[in-house]
C-alpha cells in the first residue's frame, strides 16, 4: 500500500511538471477580457493506481494489484463438532489418535477427517485444555480451539469498530473488518458485492470517488479518464473534443481562442 501511494505521488508530481511546462510554453494570465487572445493547452491524464484485492486470494491475505477499484476478500473460521464413534469392530483396522499416535481400542472421535481419543479431543491452548466434544470447536491452522480461546487469542479485531470478528472476516486495504463495517468513507454505505476505490488509504464507492477525486470536463460534466486527451483553459478542464467555440462548436484544441464571460470563443465569434 505504501508503494502504491509513493507511485501515485510520483505520478502527480510528474503531471504537475508537465502542466508547468505547458504554462511556460504558452503563458496565460489568470484574468481575461474579450480582447485578450489565448492558446489552448493539451495534456494527457495520468494513470492513477488503485488497490484491488483478488478474490482468489481468500485465506491468504489478498494480493494488491493495479486496477480500477477492488473487492474485499471474505474468510471465516471453520467450526464444527466431533462425532463419537463406537470401538472398531474385530477385523477392522484399529484407528490411531491424531494427538498421541496410540491405537484407540475403545470409542473414538472423528472431526475434519482426523481421529482422536475422547481424552485428547480438547482445546489446544495449554492453559485451557477444555473438552470439545460437547461444546464444539473452532479450527485455526489445523489446531482446534474452544470458542472462548479463539475469540480471546485468535479472532481478528475489526479496524472500524474494534470488536472481535468471530464469524465472516472481510480483508481489504491491509485491514480486517466485519462485512457490515467495511463502508464508503463518504456516504457510509456497505460495499457488499460492489467494488471500492482507494484514495489516501480510505475506501470509497465508485460514485463518491468520482465525485471527490476525478477531474471532470467543464463542458460535458463527465470524468476525464486515464489516457484521455484534455485541455486546461480558463481555469477549467475539458476533454479535447469538448473544448469548442461556444457559438459555432468549432474545436479549439491547440488553437487561438478568446474568453468571453468565462467561455471559449473562436476569433470569428469573439465579438
Image (spheres, rainbow, N blue to C red):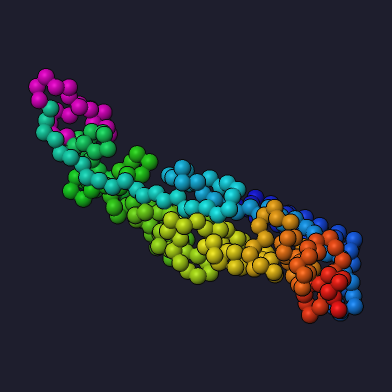
Along the line of sight, which residue is nearer the eye, 112 or 252? 252
Image spot of residue 146 (x, y percent): 28, 49
Image spot of residue 226 (x, y percent): 67, 54
7 horizontally vs 17: left or right: left
Q: Is residue 202 magenta?
A: no
199 horizontally vs 107: left or right: right
The C terminus sits in image quarter: bottom right
Q: Is residue 99 magenta?
A: yes
Image spot of residue 201 (x, y percent): 58, 60
127 horizontally vs 60: left or right: left
Q: How many marks?
A: 0
Q: Answer above or below: position of 111 versus 239.
A: above
186 horizontally vs 150: left or right: right
State which region is magenta: 89-108
Along the line of sight, which residue is nearer the eye, 50 or 102? 50
Along the line of sight, which residue is nearer the eye, 135 or 35? 35
Does the rendering let one see residue 153? no
Report the residue at 27% width, 38% height from top.
112
Image spot of residue 26 (x, y percent): 89, 64
Does the rendering let one see residue 89? yes
Amino acid at each position: 500500500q505504501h508503494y502504491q501511494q509513493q507511485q501515485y505521488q510520483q505520478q502527480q508530481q510528474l503531471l504537475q511538471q508537465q502542466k508547468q511546462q505547458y504554462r511556460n510554453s504558452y503563458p496565460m494570465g489568470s484574468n481575461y477580457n474579450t480582447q485578450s487572445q489565448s492558446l489552448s493547452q493539451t495534456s494527457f491524464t495520468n494513470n492513477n493506481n488503485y488497490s484491488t484485492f483478488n478474490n482468489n486470494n481468500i485465506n491468504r491475505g489478498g494480493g494488491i494489484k493495479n486496477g480500477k477499484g477492488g473487492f474485499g476478500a471474505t474468510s471465516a473460521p471453520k467450526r464444527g463438532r466431533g462425532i463419537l464413534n463406537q470401538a472398531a469392530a474385530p477385523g477392522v483396522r484399529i484407528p490411531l489418535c491424531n494427538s498421541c499416535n496410540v491405537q484407540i481400542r475403545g470409542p473414538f472421535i472423528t472431526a475434519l477427517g482426523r481421529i482422536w481419543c475422547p481424552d485428547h479431543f480438547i482445546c489446544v491452548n495449554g492453559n485451557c485444555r477444555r473438552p470439545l466434544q460437547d461444546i464444539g470447536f473452532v479450527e485455526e491452522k489445523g489446531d482446534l480451539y474452544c470458542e472462548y480461546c479463539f475469540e480471546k487469542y485468535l479472532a481478528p479485531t475489526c479496524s472500524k469498530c474494534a470488536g472481535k470478528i468471530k464469524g465472516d472476516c472481510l480483508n481489504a486495504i491491509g485491514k480486517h473488518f466485519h462485512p457490515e463495517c467495511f463502508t464508503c468513507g463518504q456516504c457510509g454505505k456497505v460495499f457488499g458485492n460492489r467494488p471500492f476505490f482507494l484514495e489516501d488509504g480510505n475506501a470509497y464507492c465508485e460514485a463518491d470517488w468520482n465525485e471527490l477525486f476525478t477531474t471532470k470536463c467543464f463542458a460535458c460534466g463527465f470524468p476525464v479518464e486515464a489516457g484521455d486527451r484534455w485541455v486546461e483553459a480558463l481555469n477549467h478542464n475539458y476533454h479535447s473534443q469538448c473544448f469548442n467555440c461556444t457559438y459555432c462548436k468549432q474545436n479549439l484544441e491547440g488553437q487561438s481562442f478568446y474568453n468571453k464571460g468565462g467561455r471559449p470563443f473562436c476569433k470569428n465569434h469573439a465579438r
